[in-house]
Amino acid sequence: YVLVTEFFLPRSRVIVAPVLNIVFALCELCLPITAIFVKDWRMLCLYYVVAAFLAVPSLLWIDESPRITIFTQGDEEKTKKTMNRIAKYNRATYESAYLSEYMNSYDQTHRVSESKKASILDIARNKSVRMSCILCMIAWFAGSFSYYGISFNIPNLKTDIYTVGIVLTIVEIIGVSAAGAISDWFGRKVSLAVNL
């Protein structure tokens, strides 16, 4: 998810993130549709394992995130090549200022990590990081709790599980599309705060 959004300019990410979630939901939609026709669960699992193995070669042409490359390897040339590819994909020009920003950030992090061992308590010491961490935990818990609540309530519906799976996935596609539009109009902070 993060890698895909890094390949696009900030103004395009509002569109790309929901489209990525919609593609995920469409893949989810394949499960109940396939299960209608393939009744044996072993064969159903086999179909999905084969599909997963067919996706493995795609890892050969997907670049690593420039941030990860610079922070884990410190490889400036590889990062430059990746950023050139991202710029070419976006029909933009590569600006060395971005790489300089990454390198400065890497140098600062590297100096800090060499001089001082990081601990989990560093999250609690910095107010901004602490608040971000707490808000992410609350948002993650609320989203997961809602999703599991819907999933566990499926047996109470008076229809077959395949139809319910199809309907829930279609509702998810509509919800993701609406969330993308609302986030674009009102901003991430307002839309997240209202929905929680």
Image: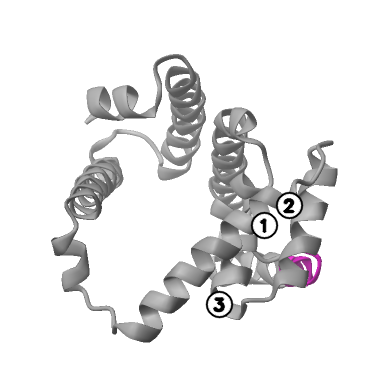
Tag 2 and tag 1, C-beta contact below 8 Å: yes
Tag 1 and tag 3, C-beta contact below 8 Å: no
Where does residue 196 sit, x and y in percent of width and height? Answer: 21, 31
Say which label, 1 or 3, has the lower sequence index.
3
Where does residue 76 sit, x and y in percent of width and height? Answer: 71, 70
- In the image, 180 versus 12, the foreground residue is 12
Q: Residues within 10 Å of mark 2 (few under 14, many from 20)?
A: few
User: Going by the image, does 156 lie left or right of 115?
Assistant: left
Q: Which mark is residue 72?
A: 3
Which residue lies under the disc numbered 1? Answer: 99
Three-letter code for the amino acid on which mark 3 is drawn: Thr
Query: Closer to us: mark 1 or mark 3?
Result: 1
Q: Which mark is residue 115?
A: none
- In the image, 161 versus 107, the foreground residue is 107
Residue 66 in view (yes/no): yes
Kind of element beneath mark 3:
helix
Q: CA distance from mark 2 to mark 1?
A: 5 Å
For the point 79% across and 72% down, which residue is it? 60
Question: For the magenta stretch, what is the residue range?
Answer: 54-61
How are the colours assigned in the image? Answer: one colour
Number of marks in the image?
A: 3
User: Going by the image, does 185 lie left or right of 27?
Assistant: left
Where does residue 104 sit, x and y in percent of width and height? Answer: 54, 62
Three-letter code for the amino acid on which mark 1 is drawn: Leu
Three-letter code for the amino acid on which mark 2 is drawn: Ser
For the point 77% across and 71% down, which residue is it? 77
- In the image, 96 versus 159, the foreground residue is 96
Kind of element beneath mark 1:
helix
For the point 16% across and 72% down, which residue is it? 121
Which residue lies under the disc numbered 2? Answer: 96
Identify the image quadrant of residue 79: bottom right
